[in-house]
Amino acid sequence: MTSVHAEYVLTDDDIALGDVVTEQLQKMWGWYLAWGILAMIFGFFVISYRHASVFAIIYLASGFFIAGGLFEIVGASRMARQRWLHLVFGLVWIGVGIVGFVWPHITIFIVAVLIGWAFLVLGIFDIVDSIRNHFMPYWWMYLIRGIVAVALGFLCIRHPGAPLTALVVLIGILAIVFGAVEIVGAFSARHAKRHWEAYKARLR
């Protein structure tokens, strides 16, 4: 049996998948909340950092990317579908972070390009994921975060010679935006099943 709406039709597969996804989200809401809070704290710390240097930028950004990558990989193990997308995103971020730690003498140009590509991956991932999960509340926040990340990524790649302070601010802004969206998403995930049931009811 399918649920019919004037503009959209939910199939039995859609409903079954939505039930699984929302159940998993509801179980993981505390994980998203903790990561969001940590990301925001990190962002404010980076912006207030007064001793900007190439090494400081490398280590701060690398630590953030590795932590974010690990978060995505752990989350991927509980995803009901397209786990590979979260795994790829997590591995890319961890890879960028490892490069920063094992190659600390790279120039600020390379650092900016690496950070820029990491931002682009995050942005594209968020945009695709937000459209795919458009039935969830606050899906548009992930879309906005994706657009912001893509814009920051292009800035880093096109202007790798920007001052260190500018790069610090970009990293801090992204971390704060990233954390804020995760916190809002966490509270949404806490009631994911209720939101999903209401969405299904609207389409009946």
Image (spheres, rainbow, N blue to C red):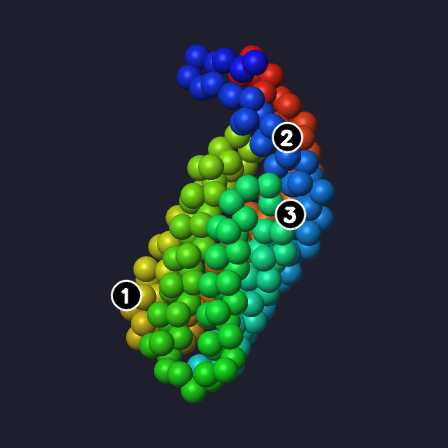
For the point 65% across and 41% down, the residue is 25
For the point 46% across and 70% down, the residue is 96
The crowd level at tag 1 (other Cα within 10 Å; few <14, some 14-19, many 20+) is: few
For the point 39% across and 57% down, the residue is 120
> Does the rendering let one see residue 79?
yes
The amino acid type, in three-letter code, at marker 2 is Asp
Specify the quadrant of the image occupied by residue 110.
bottom left
The crowd level at tag 2 (other Cα within 10 Å; few <14, some 14-19, many 20+) is: some
Q: Earlier in the sequence, mark 1 or mark 3?
A: 3
Above/below status of 105 relative to 194:
below
Any mark on residue 19, and which? 2
Specify the quadrant of the image occupied by residue 74.
bottom right
In this rendered view, identify the residue nearer to me: 104 or 183. Answer: 104
Any mark on residue 30, and which? none
Question: Disc 2 and disc 3: Cα gap in Å?
Answer: 14 Å
- Counting from the top left corner in percent of width and height, residue 35 is at 64, 56
Disc 3 marks which residue?
78
Marks 1 and 3 in Cβ contact (< 8 Å): no
Marks 2 and 1 in Cβ contact (< 8 Å): no
The amino acid type, in three-letter code, at marker 3 is Arg
Q: Earlier in the sequence, mark 2 or mark 1?
A: 2
Any mark on residue 158, and which? 1
For the point 43% across and 63% down, the residue is 118
